[in-house]
Image: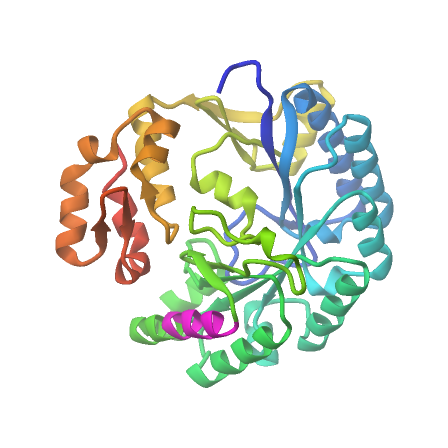
């Protein structure tokens, strides 16, 4: 990418939540209106600083809970983006919690060109929602989904979790059946990860429950089967999308890449090694070979921007080989794997030369398969993608 062409992906981190979930290790905080106002002003300053280098095709507001911002705060952010010519992205996603969706907010977001909502459902079992420390109920999920549909959103993702402590296969199947019946365009589903510094990890350490690896594997298989039966296509370990919207003309169908039409383009850009600006506390960015990380502290983030400078804690320039290894590792999370020609175009390296031993090892294990034009993980390999990915890092 030449220095002259602007970056086409923007990620914005909104670090606030109504309360912290039991499993969450992301930088987020339960917070007051005053700090949120200060954050909004700081974010607008950061947007002003990077706007000259941005022409977004994809925008993603993640969190935290971006939908926790009130109407006035959202209006300030969106009007600033309009003034900076940052609107009009082909895909503009906002993560939301079912407890913080309203018809007014839905209309405002839609009016400013937001066209995709990712809803953090996690479970449709009331007891498990409590177990996870979520603030929404089952009922709110269905209600919020209807509100978003009425506001004109025809691209909605539902986020689910499996292998939650005390979750049985029957509970998981019931959640899957209800989620499929909602007819969303996209589905993301992650296994619970026990990360240090989370209440869930402490409970595990204290022996309050144990992890059943076999059950987790069976739940993952159940997820793939249910999603496939409901017309979704898996395109990444945890992500499933439809090829087209209900009633859409068939021209919107999948191209030759094996990526369905309604896949999250923003995430595909990550997995394919693309550049993106990352704004907000704790956000990482990757721009022309340099990775940056903002301070994971909202006060400090605001302080820096109020002084007129970016709130970057660290930046590093990756060597081309190290970066290529990362891109290989990320891209293998996708079902389509890495077409050799694409990989060479993105990184300048030939996967078959630099990583032939690793690919042979994965083939021998039954985790990978090589064809004339690409290398990809098998269904079993995708289950252990993190271990497979590590082999490509340099």
Residue 280 in sight: no
Query: How far across and how far down the image is residue 47, in percent?
Result: 70, 28
Q: Which residues are magenta?
A: 220-230
In depth, the one of 164 and 155 nearer the eye is 155
**Where residue 186 sits in the image (x, y, percent)?**
57, 60
Q: Quadrant of residue 34?
A: top right
- Residue 290 to residue 171: above or below: above
Q: Is residue 316 left or right of residue 320?
A: right
**Magenta span has 114?**
no
Relative to 381, does residue 232 appear above or below in the rendering?
A: below
Quarter of the figure with residue 299: top right
Task: Reply yes or no: does residue 226 show up in magenta.
Answer: yes
Task: Pick the residue in front: 350 or 112.
Answer: 350
Quadrant occupied by the C terminus: top left
Quadrant housing residue 86? top right
The secondary structure that most of the magenta stretch takes on is helix
At x 62%, y 66%, the residue is 184
Residue that appears at 42% across and 55% down = 195
Q: Position of residue 38 (x, y in %)?
A: 77, 35
Residue 166 to residue 42: above or below: below
């Amino acid at each position: 990418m030449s220095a002259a062409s602007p970056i086409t992906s923007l990620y914005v981190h909104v670090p606030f939540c109504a309360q912290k979930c039991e499993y969450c290790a992301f930088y987020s905080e339960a917070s007051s209106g005053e700090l949120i106002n200060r954050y909004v002003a700081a974010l607008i300053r950061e947007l002003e600083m990077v706007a000259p280098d941005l022409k977004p095709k994809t925008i993603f507001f993640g969190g935290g809970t971006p939908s926790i911002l009130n109407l006035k705060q959202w209006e300030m952010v969106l009007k600033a983006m309009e003034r900076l010519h940052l609107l009009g992205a082909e895909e503009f996603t906002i993560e939301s919690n079912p407890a913080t969706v309203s018809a007014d907010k839905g209309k405002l977001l839609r009016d400013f060109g937001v066209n995709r909502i990712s809803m953090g459902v996690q479970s449709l079992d009331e007891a498990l929602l409590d177990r996870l420390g979520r603030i929404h109920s089952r009922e709110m999920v269905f209600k919020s989904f209807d509100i978003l549909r009425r506001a004109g959103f025809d691209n909605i993702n539902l986020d689910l979790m499996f292998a939650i402590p005390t979750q049985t296969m029957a509970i998981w199947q019931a959640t899957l059946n209800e989620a499929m019946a909602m007819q969303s365009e996209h589905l993301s589903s992650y296994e619970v990860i026990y990360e240090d510094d989370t209440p869930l990890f402490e409970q595990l350490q204290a022996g309050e429950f144990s992890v059943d690896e076999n059950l987790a594997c069976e739940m993952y298989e159940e997820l793939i089967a249910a999603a496939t039966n409901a017309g979704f296509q898996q395109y990444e370990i945890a992500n499933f999308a439809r090829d087209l919207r209900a009633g859409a003309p068939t021209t919107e169908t999948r191209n030759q890449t094996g990526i369905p039409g309604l896949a999250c383009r923003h995430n595909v850009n990550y997995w394919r090694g693309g550049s993106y600006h990352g704004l907000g506390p704790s956000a990482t960015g990757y721009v022309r070979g340099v990775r940056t990380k903002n301070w994971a502290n909202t006060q400090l983030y605001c302080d820096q921007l109020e002084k007129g400078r970016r709130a970057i804690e660290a930046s590093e320039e990756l060597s081309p080989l190290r970066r290529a290894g990362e891109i290989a590792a990320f891209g293998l999370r996708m079902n389509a794997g890495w077409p050799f020609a694409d990989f060479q175009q993105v990184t300048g390296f030939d996967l078959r030369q630099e990583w032939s031993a690793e690919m042979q090892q994965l083939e021998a294990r039954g985790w990978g398969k090589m064809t004339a034009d690409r290398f990809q993980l098998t269904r079993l390999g995708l289950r252990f993608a993190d271990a497979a990915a590590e082999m490509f890092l340099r």
